[in-house]
Image (tube, rainbow, N blue to C red):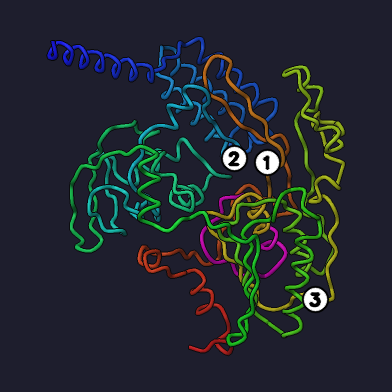
Amino acid sequence: MNRIYWIALIIFLSMYMVTGRAQESIVYQPEQMQADLEKFKTALIKIHPGTYTHQNHEEFNQMMNDLMLQTSKPMEAKIFYKIVLRLIANIHDGHTQAYTFGKLGSIINSQKRLPFQVYIKDERIFIMKNLSSLEIPEGSEILSIDNNLSNEIIIDILAHYSSDGESQSGMQHWLGGPYRSFYRLYPEIFGEQPTYNLVYRDYKTKKIIKTKIEAIPKEVYETRKSKKYLPETVHEKAFNFEINKEESYAYLKISRFIKDGFDEPENTYPDFYKQCFKKISDKNIKNLIIDLRNNGGGKASNAAYLLQYFIDQPITPAKEIVALVDDKYFLEITGNSSNLDESFGLKRKKDGTFKVTKHESLRDLMNYDPIEEYRYNGRLIVLINGGTTSAAGIAAGLLKEYTNADFVGTETYGYAGISNGVRQISIKGNHTETAIYLPLLHAKYTIDEHIQKRSVVPDYNVSNAIQDILEDNDAVLEFALKKLLPSTYKNY
């Protein structure tokens, strides 16, 4: 009797596991996928202000035709999601995203992860945090996973995810930067497996080693990370300022261009800047380093306020901010108003687009006068990297346009002279659990038109080597101090 019970229990559990696994395999039919692709296509054409920034109409239509052909037979939902990711990545806009919801969203979110956090440089992948059960030294270089070479892995992931423009610097930073999303994107793009064949170069011995690693659930990943490493959730200050008297330079770190929220007092940043430049003036500091690395953006007006201390003529940061549609369109299509007209004072232009006229809502359109009292005329160095996004990219672009600053670091994630990041909406599929998230407003800044659509490129391309990361050295700041500051101000 006991034996029969256990046999029956084993059979039941086996059937349950198979059924549970089968439930994860959602299959879409061609008509479902193609109907949602058409919906996304219409939204990108009618609403998105940057669909044709990096492609023409013919190229966009050709891509849509290719995707329609690929979805002409039944397909697993996870594979269809990758198709939507490629569609959005081809827009090359960091404020435009694809995502999943419902059951498919739960499946994607619960996929097992690679047990590593990584640092990526020059299409090479280095292990920074080892959360596996294997003794792999931090700093070891991943050469391949399941015979996929490291550079091929990065190229394939970047075909599904993109930053502003077509530079890969920002996305490589994003994959291995503060959010370190490589661990979850590899299974998403290359397929979830219980184990992976890993080939790596040992950091200590320099030997090439082949092994197998087990994928781990999200909960195990987080538990191991919290036990083995210090938490990364320390809330960084929005801005910080200090003066190094010995070497006669000031250091201004701006981590984001929004302190507590978009409804914070408008004078928050102007008041802070005034304090900084008063101290610089009082102490007669002739060397200033502005650090915009890993600045996630915020309000571009807070970048414009900073610029007032460097310019000698009034400027208007944004030439124009427009939307392709107004509230009437959204009422007809979705039944809801996006409140664009009231919020931004939209006025129809001759070309059919709608111009923002409420300057108090978007202060990028206001005039900014020079602040003569504490105007800075000394040496200026700006630090940037692939984590310099959105309004921080605009800040870097404005500083490059209107000052003689030396830029050190790596190419930014954000555009130098355009932005689509003011207001976004979600468009959900009617037949699949996929959706896209896209911007409504397009801003064009007073940056030379030949560099508007690209990220800001440094004058000195400098980034941390793997040794710098492991030893907590800042090679970029060190380069600025040792190589760019006048020797009369340094004590080495």
User: Of tags 3 and 2, which is closer to the observer?
Assistant: 3
Mark 2 lies on residue: 93
Residues in magenta? 398-414
Q: What residue type is labelled 2?
A: Asp
User: Of tags 1 and 3, which is closer to the observer?
Assistant: 3
Query: Image check: 87 left or right of 296?
Result: left
Residue 42 lies, with reference to residue 456, above or below; the image says above
Q: Which amino acid does label 1 sit on?
A: Asn
Residue in the image at 49% along x and 31% along y? 86
- Whether residue 17 appears in magenta in the rendering, the answer is no
Query: Image check: 53 left or right of 278?
Result: left
Mark 3 lies on residue: 374
Total numbered labels placed on residues in the image: 3
Mark 1 lies on residue: 420
Going from N to C along the chain, the mark reached first, 1 or 3, is 3
Q: Where is residue 305 in the image (x, y as percent from the top left)?
A: 77, 61
Q: Nearer the viewer, residue 200 or 479?
A: 200
Q: Which amino acid does label 3 sit on?
A: Tyr
Residue 375 lies, with reference to residue 257, above or below; the image says below
Q: Dot 1, crowdedness within 10 Å: few (<14), some or many (≥20)? A: many
